[in-house]
Image: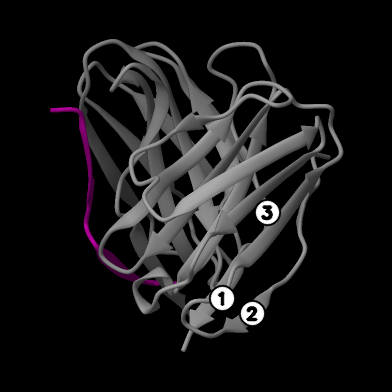
Amino acid sequence: EDQVTQSPEALRLQEGESSSLNCSYTVSGLRGLFWYRQDPGKGPEFLFTLYSAGEEKEKERLKATLTKKESFLHITAPKPEDSATYLCAVQAFSGGYNKLIFGAGTRLAVHP
Amino acid sequence: DVKVTQSSRYLVKRTGEKVFLECVQDMDHENMFWYRQDPGLGLRLIYFSYDVKMKEKGDIPEGYSVSREKKERFSLILESASTNQTSMYLCASSPGASFQPQHFGDGTRLSIL
């Protein structure tokens, strides 16, 4: 069964304390992995797309990497404004159509 | 920037009512999607559309229908609202080319009393 698992469920960091979020997946035929940021009461905001193992993308304090089984979102020297839920989604052919399979998300809280 | 606009941020309706949720995108995207998001269950796909007047069922279509009469607009219809349809509803769009990211609206928080 196609599945996306994110860990940890919640993460509390001090400002400046770097860390990584994990997204592991089991899908037959990966067609892209996407990272989103979601603030409370808002829709997910697109961050990165990764298509093949070894690929990396960066944006400000965020860096996303991809292997054949998982993706990491590295957060370097985070600030309080990085606090949000980070969602990972995998594009796969499942149930007869191309679909996004979402993980449950990691709730990140960065404290000053 | 892609703009996906959902007509209401908050909506309160009564059991049995017919409810319409509207979504408009301004980037000429072919694909449009409706999800619901519930704590502990994540985002689940209700319906999607790859073209005008075309619709496909997602993972949880029961109790819902959709309409896409124009390329930029995708409507979700709750035929007879029930309390278990209380949720956050999210609309998304993406280009027709395969495997492009979906862009989301800010959601409609729907409460059915």
- Residue named by callout 3: B105
Estimate the x, y position of residue B27 in percent, counting from the top left: 84, 32
* Region in magenta: A1-15
Of the numbered discs 3 and 2, the one sitting upstream in the chain is 2
Q: Amino acid at mark 1?
A: Glu
- Disc 3 and disc 2: Cα gap in Å? 15 Å
- Disc 1 and disc 3: Cα gap in Å? 24 Å
Left or right: B106 in relation to A36: right
Can residue A41 be seen here? The reply is no
- Say whether residue A12 is magenta: yes
The circle drawn on residue B32 is none
How dense is the environment of label 2, judged by Cα within 10 Å: few (below 14), some, or many (20 and up)? some
The image shows residue A74, relative to residue B50, as above or below, that is: below
Left or right: B19 in relation to A33: right
- Residue named by callout 2: B11
Of the numbered discs 2 and 1, the one sitting upstream in the chain is 2
Of the numbered discs 1 and 3, the one sitting upstream in the chain is 1
